[in-house]
Image (tube, grey):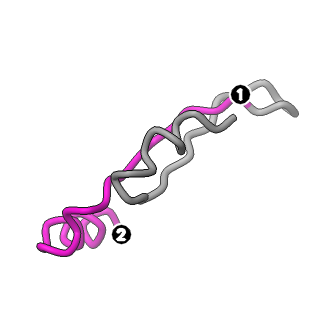
């Protein structure tokens, strides 16, 4: 799946998007999990600011 995402981002239309990975702590177990999303470049800061 990662190869498909990278290939999509290399297209000319994919330059307006960024793959963002954020680390979150689970309230239930206390373990860290990673949340990955592909968001428009204008919304990267908003995505990282969410809790």
Q: Position of residue 12 (x, y in %)?
A: 12, 73
Residue at the front extreme of this rendering = 42
Question: Left or right: 17 with respect to 7?
Answer: right
Q: Where is residue 1 in the image (x, y as percent from the top left)?
A: 36, 69
Report the disc number at residue 42: none
Q: Say whether disc 2 or disc 1 marks the residue closer to the N-terminus.
A: 2
Above or below: residue 27 compared with residue 7: above
Are there few (<14), some (14-19), or many (20+) residues within 10 Å of tag 1? few
Above or below: residue 42 compared with residue 27: below
Whether pointer 2 and pointer 1 mark residues with C-beta atoms closer than 8 Å, the reply is: no
Of 16 and 27, the residue lying toward us: 16
Q: Residue at x 27, y 72 (%)?
A: 4
Mark pair 2, 1: CA separation: 25 Å
Residue 19 lies in the magenta stretch: yes
Q: Which contiguous range is marked in magenta?
A: 1-25
Q: Residue at x 23, y 69 (%)?
A: 14
Residue hosting label 2:
1
Q: Position of residue 51 (x, y in %)?
A: 69, 34
Question: Left or right: 15 with respect to 19?
Answer: left
- Image quadrant of residue 30? top right
Above or below: residue 21 compared with residue 40: above
Q: Position of residue 8 (x, y in %)?
A: 23, 73
Residue hosting label 1:
31
Question: Left or right: 17 with respect to 25?
Answer: left
Residue 48 lies in the magenta stretch: no
- Image quadrant of residue 6? bottom left
Q: Is mark 1 on a helix, strand or loop?
A: loop
Q: Which residue is drawn at 41% across and 59% down?
A: 38
Q: Is mark 2 on a helix, strand or loop?
A: loop
């Amino acid at each position: 799946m990662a190869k498909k995402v990278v290939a999509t981002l290399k297209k000319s239309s994919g330059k307006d998007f960024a793959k963002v990975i954020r680390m979150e702590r689970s309230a239930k177990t206390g373990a860290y999990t990673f949340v990955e999303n592909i968001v428009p470049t204008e919304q990267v800061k908003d995505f990282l600011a969410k809790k």
